[in-house]
Image: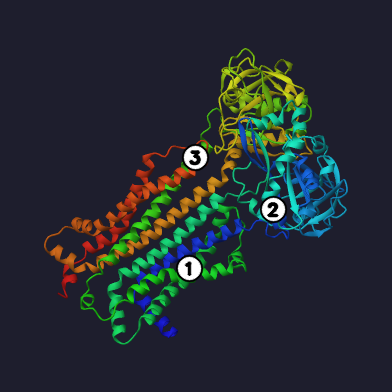
């Protein structure tokens, strides 16, 4: 029986080659899209599963509100980890990590130039770190960091510095300090939330010990491991105990900087300690302030999954639509089969066999398409998949089930629809098209296809507009043509830095240069400051968290910052050592009516006082998802605080980038020969804040194109079938004087009505979807009616072009041939 079903299926495939190829092409594209998206979703949801104790490991996070600043973060204070381990027996151990930022790593080579690199994946960690995560070791043990001066590398990093020789016992110099390699960790998979190349003992970094008292200095990440996998009830019970711990230990730290922590809590502030399981961290920390570079975007994953499923569904709709549209010829066949004694089950089996066969053939096409498009997919998602990964053991069940389920979904309705016929219906034998409910369903499926395509199109337009707004629109700050030179701390003292800056200024194409601890988009130094009441009648806030840059007199002109009140710094000498420039958000948050001339204190540095000499226009310091934060600029002569980060920003004349970079690299090599030069551009740094949005924009653009392709493929075939069914009608109309234009309009009218209905139905749905997506952004574009009009015009033009090909072909046909049999 099965062999007969397959034989008949191939016969029908050959008999209706055009429609069969349309079905296979549509299903192949849909299956390929779903296949690739399925791998991406699996990848995003498999983070940290390679660790044996992942279910027992948790990231310690903070849910905070301090004055006008609130949010969630994985950044934690140094005392938190040890307190959790000491006070709560449910927790087996804790470990802290401290990101070293940019580190100069050097290996001395006898008789040759030293091997040195600027490394950005070095971390200082507690000795319990390796034991907590239990990373697989290639050499050494999980106790490799127990001794001061030891170092652990990943397998790939060891090969980078030592080749095929064993690195154990060898020495590397990190920022001038020598460490001995005591362990090698096997290469971490890309699905590890914690990524590193170098591990160093935290005890070797005095800065951590200096802030061991502070519950304000949020510069470490903290991890906790339970004795056994905790239940939700256990976690909830444990988290309920944390507020008492915070109230017991944090007030002393806040009092040390002149703040009453308990009173702040009474006034609505909070500092809640929360636990997030390691496995769910990757997709459940969206919007967190974090130094982790591996955090994903759950919303983006869901969008990808939905869009991939919709593309496959559109292909299935195509199959069902074309199958029911050609019901005239198939009902003859079914009627004859029923007359010859076939029962309903046999007929259903026949049609399901055909749909499964189509699906399997389409899966072969999908395999070819996925292999060809895999490099582009890797570039889009940031994955590094090989063709063999498409058929890996974990993915194989999905690959097998995908065509089977697709075949069943495609074949169920046509199977039961056709199997209803009991005998050969004379009306069907005479070629009268199916009507009634089936025509209504077929039209509804066309409307559904174009509705989905229009929603995707509108989504792609809005995401692109928001991405353009985020990366190109920059009020108050000129991002373009600003070169960033990193690691400026290696230039030496202030005098050496000034000499280097002057040499930079003499390079043709350089407009201005400045030094700064941080730069917009790259972070900032955050701490609390207390505004003074002065002669103002309205009360000011007690304290305010300010994000700040310590810089020089050239910072404002180099970055194109607009001063709207007061002045810029006058010099880098002591005359501005007590001056500060605030942005509009900071002045408003302080509670001042006019900021210029007002004073504020910094409890973190013995109540050092600063006078506001200027107010700058608000600019985006980070992502437009977040509200513009209060920002301060301090003069470097204030020596208010110290940070590890130090950068040079250089404004260039447009078009001089290549020549200037060459001269900058030569100057750097002459000035600091032992440190590799690292440079970037400010606009590129901002663009990296929107990698997720860029992926979403590209995916929606590509999948909108696929949706339109599949929809037009089905529309093209339906138009061809309609023209075939109305061949004699067209011939009669031409004989009676109908024009080609009139016949094209007659054949196109019904399909264009369906597209217009799709536009009407999809517009409010698309508006709701994009408006909800835009709610994630504090600053966003306005969704104008022009975008909807553009999508509607594109849908109409594409459908009209698709239909017109078959309509014009039918209208130009010789009526004598079409009426010859009458």
Where disc 2 sits, the SS reads helix
Residue 572 lies, in percent from the top left, at 71, 20
Q: Secondary structure at mark 1?
A: helix
Residue 596, quarter of the rendered image? top right
Which tag, 1 or 3, sits closer to the chain's start? 1
- Mark 1 vs mark 2, CA separation in Å: 50 Å
As drawn, the label of residue 592 is: none
What residue is disc 1 on? 365
Q: Inspect this view and state whether residue 724 appears.
A: yes
Q: Position of residue 63 (x, y in %)?
A: 65, 40
Q: Position of residue 757 (x, y in %)?
A: 31, 53
Q: Nearer the viewer, mark 3 or mark 2?
A: 2
The quadrant of the picture occupied by the C terminus is bottom left
* The one of 343 and 712 positioned closer to us in this rendering: 343
- Whether tag 1 and tag 2 are in contact, CB under 8 A, the answer is no
- SS for callout 3: helix
| Gap in angstroms between the C-alphas marked 1 and 3 | 36 Å
Instruction: State the residue lying farthest toward the left.
Output: 736
Q: CA distance from mark 3 to mark 2?
A: 46 Å
Residue at the extreme top: 535
Q: Circle 3 is placed at which residue position?
A: 468
Out of 638 and 440, give the one closest to the viewer.
440
Is residue 115 something that shows in the picture?
Answer: no
Residue denoted by label 2: 234
């Amino acid at each position: 029986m099965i062999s007969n079903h397959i034989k008949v299926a191939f016969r029908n495939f050959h008999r209706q080659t055009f429609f069969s190829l349309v079905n296979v092409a549509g299903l192949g594209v849909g299956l390929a899209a779903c296949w690739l998206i399925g791998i991406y979703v699996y990848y995003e949801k498999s983070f940290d599963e390679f660790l044996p104790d992942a279910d027992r490991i948790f990231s310690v996070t903070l849910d905070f509100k301090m004055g006008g600043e609130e949010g969630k973060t994985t950044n934690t204070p140094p005392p938190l980890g040890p307190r959790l381990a000491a006070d709560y027996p449910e927790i087996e151990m804790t470990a802290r990590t401290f990101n070293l930022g940019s580190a100069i790593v050097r290996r001395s080579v006898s008789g040759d130039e030293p091997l040195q690199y600027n490394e950005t994946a070095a971390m200082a960690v507690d000795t319990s770190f390796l034991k907590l995560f239990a990373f697989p070791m290639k050499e050494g043990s999980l106790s490799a960091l127990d001794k001061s001066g030891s170092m652990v590398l990943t397998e790939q990093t060891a090969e980078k510095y030592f080749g095929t020789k064993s690195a154990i016992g060898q020495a590397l110099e990190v920022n001038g300090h020598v460490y001995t390699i005591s362990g090698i960790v096997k290469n971490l998979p890309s699905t590890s939330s914690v990524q590193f190349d170098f591990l160093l003992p935290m005890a070797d970094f005095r800065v951590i010990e200096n802030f061991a008292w502070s519950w304000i200095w949020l510069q470490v990440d903290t991890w906790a491991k339970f004795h056994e996998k905790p239940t939700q009830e256990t976690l909830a019970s444990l988290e309920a105990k944390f507020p008492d711990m915070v109230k017991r230990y944090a007030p002393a730290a806040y009092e040390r900087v002149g703040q009453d922590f308990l009173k702040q809590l009474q006034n609505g502030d909070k500092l809640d300690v929360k636990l997030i399981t390691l496995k769910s961290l990757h997709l459940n920390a969206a919007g967190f302030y974090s130094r982790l570079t591996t955090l994903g975007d759950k919303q983006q994953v869901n969008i990808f999954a939905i869009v991939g499923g919709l593309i496959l569904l559109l292909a299935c709709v195509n199959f069902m639509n074309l199958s029911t549209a050609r019901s005239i010829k198939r009902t003859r066949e079914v009627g004859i089969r029923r007359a010859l004694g076939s029962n309903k089950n046999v007929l259903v089996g026949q049609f399901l066999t055909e749909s499964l066969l189509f699906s399997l053939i389409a899966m072969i096409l999908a395999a070819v398409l996925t292999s060809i498009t895999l490099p582009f997919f890797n570039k889009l998602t940031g994955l590094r998949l090989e063709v063999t990964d498409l058929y890996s053991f974990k993915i194989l069940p999905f690959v097998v089930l995908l065509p089977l389920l697709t075949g069943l979904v495609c074949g169920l309705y046509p199977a039961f629809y056709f199997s209803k016929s009991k005998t050969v219906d004379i009306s069907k034998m005479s070629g009268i098209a199916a009507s009634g409910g089936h025509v209504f369903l077929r039209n509804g499926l066309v409307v559904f296809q174009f509705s989905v395509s229009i929603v995707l199109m509108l989504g792609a337009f809005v995401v692109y507009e928001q991405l353009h707004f985020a990366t190109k629109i920059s009020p108050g700050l000129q991002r373009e043509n600003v070169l960033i030179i990193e690691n400026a701390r290696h230039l030496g003292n202030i005098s050496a830095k000034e000499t280097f800056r002057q040499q930079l200024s003499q390079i043709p194409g350089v407009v201005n240069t400045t030094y700064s601890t941080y730069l917009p988009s790259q972070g900032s130094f955050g701490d609390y400051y207390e505004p003074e009441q002065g002669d103002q009648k309205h009360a000011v806030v007690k304290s305010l968290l300010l994000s700040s840059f310590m810089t020089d007199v050239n910072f404002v002109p180099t970055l194109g910052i607009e001063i709207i009140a007061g002045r810029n710094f006058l010099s880098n000498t002591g005359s501005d050592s007590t001056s500060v420039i605030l942005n509009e958000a900071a002045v408003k948050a302080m509670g001042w009516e006019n900021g210029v001339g007002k004073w504020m204190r910094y409890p973190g540095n013995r109540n050092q006082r600063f006078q506001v000499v200027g107010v700058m226009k608000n600019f985006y310091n980070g992502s437009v998802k977040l509200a513009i934060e209060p920002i301060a600029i301090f003069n470097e002569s204030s020596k208010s605080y110290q940070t590890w980060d130090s950068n040079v920003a250089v404004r260039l004349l447009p078009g001089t980038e290549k020549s200037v970079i060459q001269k900058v690299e030569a100057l750097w090599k002459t000035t600091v020969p032992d440190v590799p030069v690292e440079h970037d551009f400010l606009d590129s740094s901002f663009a990296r804040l929107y990698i997720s949005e860029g992926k979403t924009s590209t995916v929606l653009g590509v999948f909108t194109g696929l949706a339109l392709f599949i929809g037009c493929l089905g529309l093209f075939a339906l138009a061809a079938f309609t023209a075939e069914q109305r061949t004699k009608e067209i011939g009669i109309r031409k004989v009676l004087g109908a024009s080609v234009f009139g016949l094209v309009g007659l054949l196109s009218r019904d399909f264009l009505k369906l597209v217009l209905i799709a536009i009407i139905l999809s517009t409010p749905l698309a508006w709701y979807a994009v408006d909800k997506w835009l709610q994630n952004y504090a600053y966003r574009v306005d969704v104008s009616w022009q975008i909807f009009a553009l999508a509607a015009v594109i849908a109409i033009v594409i459908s009209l072009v698709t239909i017109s090909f078959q309509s014009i072909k039918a209208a130009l046909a010789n009526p004598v041939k079409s009426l010859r049999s009458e």
